[in-house]
Amino acid sequence: MANVSMRQMLEAGVHFGHQTRFWDPKMAPYIFGERNKIHIINLEKTLPLYNEAAEFVRKVVADGGRVLFVGTKRAARDCMLREAERCGMPHVTYRWLGGMLTNFKTVKQSIKRLKDLEAQAEDGSFEALNKKEVLNLRREMEKLERSLGGIKNMGALPDVLFIVDVGHEKIALAEARKLGIPVVGVVDTNCSPNDVDYVVPGNDDSMRAIELYVTGIAEAVLEGKASVPSVVESTDEFVELDATGKPTEEAKTGRKKKSTAKKKATTRKKAVVKKAEKPAAEVPEAEEAAVETPPAEKAAAEAPAAGSEAAEKAEAEVEKPKAEKAKAEKPKVKAKKVATDEPETGEAPAKEPEAEKADEDGTKSAGSATA
């Protein structure tokens, strides 16, 4: 973080406020007095508050957060754009669109449209269109670039807003308060410090003063990025390094714990090997017991024989019903023969009525003769 002294603030004109008739009574604790109907800001309060705000920004960035630089007034536009790009943070320097934070879902669609137009311009898709269509698309791309070019790589809502002149950026301040995003703001004597989390009382119109604020915050962002612990991959583990490039204390303790654990594991293995060598001497006894197992083998050999006998019995039982069926079929054949012979023997009874008729005729003729 850039060490800003009170002399630098005096030379930059940070202590000059607005005219006394435009003052906000809520800024009274930060006002030293007045001179020629202009309020003078107390730099003894401004300097520690500024350092506190810069330290807060540094911690947020060190934790992986984003800081959105907001400064759309002419005096702050160029400086804000330059310093935000230097520290690699998103920025809004042209115009704050209503709903840029509260309606970020729709803003992301516009950002996607901007990226698509840029891709078409790079791959030569505009060459297939006529002159008028290309002109309209380039105008649209330039308009989106002015409004959203600074946040097209932001990806999500910021973690902190840094605002120069909270009175001029009241819409951005209101959206940040609604979403609970902390605000670091430069507040002049004509603005209210109520909605600002980290107040930096000072002149917000002087270009030198604005450059002093923005440069200090950008330096804090760079320091926060530099203090992020980098992870270095070694042969067997990941080691966290601090800002100086040395392993952190946690990494060292972790290594010690792992080394002690390895030593304990090796001692346990040695003890297990020693215990395993003792039972190895008792193995011959087990082999002798294994030699005496032929009776079991005989029983195992007899078991298949018994199994084969049982299988033969089962086959015999299966064959018995077949034989019984064959015997049952033989009487049926004889019965058929008997049935076929019956009609031959039955022809004689069919002729008996004719003989009876002949006897009756004989008796009748005998009777007539006697008569």
Image (tube, helix red, strand yellow):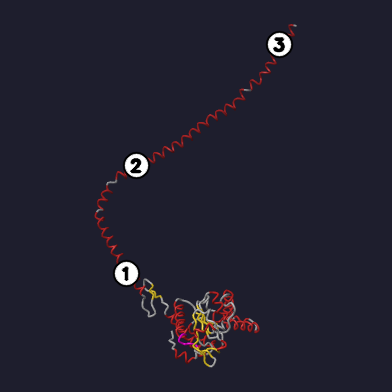
Q: At 62% from the left edge and 23% from the top edge, which residue is drawn?
A: 346
> Where the N terminus falls, by quadrant?
bottom left
Report the number of numbered marks. 3
**Mark 2 residue element:** helix
Q: Earlier in the sequence, mark 2 or mark 3?
A: 2
Q: Position of residue 363 (x, y in %)?
A: 71, 11
Q: Which residues are magenta?
A: 41-45
Indicate yes or no whether the magenta region holds residue 82.
no
- The residue identified by callout 3 is 363
> Taking 70 as reference, is 136 left or right?
right
Q: Nearer the viewer, residue 17 or 102?
A: 17
How dense is the environment of label 1, judged by Cα within 10 Å: few (below 14), some, or many (20 and up)? few
Q: Nearer the viewer, residue 25 or 321?
A: 25
Q: Quote the CA–CA distance across marks 1 and 3.
A: 144 Å
Of the two numbered discs 1 and 2 in the rendering, the one whose residue sits closer to the viewer: 1
Q: At 46% from the left edge and 36% from the top edge, which residue is drawn?
A: 319
Q: Position of residue 48 (x, y in %)?
A: 44, 84
Q: Are marks 1 and 3 in contact (CB under 8 Å)?
A: no
- The residue identified by callout 2 is 302
Q: Earlier in the sequence, mark 1 or mark 3?
A: 1
> Taking 305 as reference, is 43 left or right?
right
- The residue identified by callout 1 is 259
Q: At 59% from the left edge and 78% from the top edge, which residue is drawn?
A: 98
Residue type, numbered disc 2:
Glu
Q: At 38% from the left edge and 78% from the top edge, which residue is drawn?
A: 242
Q: Earlier in the sequence, mark 1 or mark 2?
A: 1
Q: Nearer the viewer, residue 207 or 326?
A: 207
How dense is the environment of label 3, judged by Cα within 10 Å: few (below 14), some, or many (20 and up)? few
